């Protein structure tokens, strides 16, 4: 196995190996020199150098207000691995200490869990009807209005039926679509926007003891999870997201 591959197997990233090797060859260098020789772009070079410094594999000195970086002696890699091993052993001991409690909790948890996969438009409609049957508040995030776009007439009718059943909905959208979602035209619908919500091919609905994860492929695929514990975890996550979002 080549030396660089060995270092990567020891836990260093590809960029860390490139930068470390470059410094071994250069001896002492500025970040700009390291960028040119290693092929790692300038932004990533600084991040990589900081990680290597944290691991004790790189050091630096200030000369004439400029920072020069140097590779630590290769023997330091062995020390780094020994420290990693000590850390793993320490964490292993902590896990061993709490194992009895974890096993006890596992035995006490007898709640049945079930997951069903629905495929296609009909499958998604089945899950939407499940929301109405549950008659519980629905929480949604990772949504960009794709449900309404896919089922224009059905979606409008579904929202009207939901309103008559007095089922409230809270949705957190990506901030970038705020202009297209400025007003809620459906009853009992609250919406907020959050810049941390990234473009995603999936939407999550939480209602009652169920969680539906919808993947918006050409034919939508829905994973419906029935579990009080899982639903509660998603509800708690949504509550935090909701508080951190803006109307």
Image (cartoon, rainbow, N blue to C red):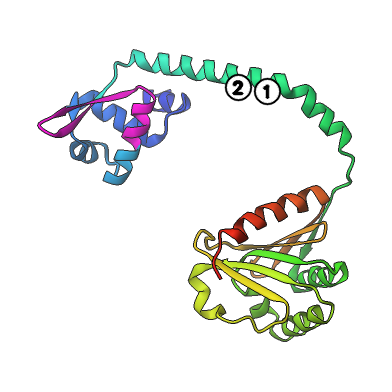
- Measured as percent of width and height from the top left, residue 105 is found at 82, 32
* Residue 77 - label: none
Secondary structure beneath label 1: helix
| Residue that badge 1 annotates | 95
Q: Are marks 2 and 1 in contact (CB under 8 Å)?
A: yes
Is residue 75 or residue 235 the one in the foreground?
A: 235
101 to the left or right of 79: right
What span is colored magenta in the figure?
48-69
Q: Is residue 65 magenta?
A: yes
Residue 129 vertical placement versus 157 (above, below): above
Q: How many marks?
A: 2
Residue 211 vertical placement versus 112 (above, below): below
C-alpha distance separating marks 2 and 1: 6 Å
Residue 24 sits in which quadrant? top left
| Residue that badge 2 annotates | 91
- Measured as percent of width and height from the top left, residue 203 is found at 65, 63
Residue 193 vertical placement versus 110 (above, below): below
Residue 162 sits in which quadrant? bottom right
- Measured as percent of width and height from the top left, residue 49 is found at 31, 33
């Amino acid at each position: 196995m080549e030396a660089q591959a060995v270092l990567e197997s020891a836990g260093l990233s590809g960029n860390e190996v490139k930068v470390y090797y470059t410094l071994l060859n250069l001896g002492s260098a500025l970040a700009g020199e390291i960028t040119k020789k290693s092929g790692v772009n300038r932004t990533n070079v600084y991040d990589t150098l900081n990680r290597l410094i944290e691991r004790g594999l790189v050091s630096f000195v200030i000369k004439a207000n400029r920072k020069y970086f140097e590779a630590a002696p290769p023997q330091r890699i062995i020390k780094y691995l020994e420290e990693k091993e000590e850390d793993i052993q320490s964490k292993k001991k902590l896990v061993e200490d709490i194992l009895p409690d974890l096993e006890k909790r596992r035995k006490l948890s007898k709640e049945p869990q079930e997951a069903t996969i629905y495929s296609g438009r009909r499958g998604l409609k089945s899950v939407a009807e499940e929301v109405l049957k549950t008659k519980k508040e629905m929480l949604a995030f990772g949504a960009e209005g794709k449900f309404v776009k896919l089922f224009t007439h059905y979606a409008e009718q579904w929202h009207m039926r939901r309103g008559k059943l007095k089922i409230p909905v809270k949705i957190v959208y990506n901030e970038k679509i705020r202009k297209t979602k400025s007003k809620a035209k459906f009853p009992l619908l609250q919406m907020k926007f959050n810049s941390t919500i990234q473009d995603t091919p999936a939407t999550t609905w939480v209602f009652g003891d169920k969680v539906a994860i919808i993947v918006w492929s050409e034919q939508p695929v829905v994973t419906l999870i029935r579990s009080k514990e899982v639903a509660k975890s998603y509800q708690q996550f949504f509550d935090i997201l909701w508080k951190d979002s803006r109307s």
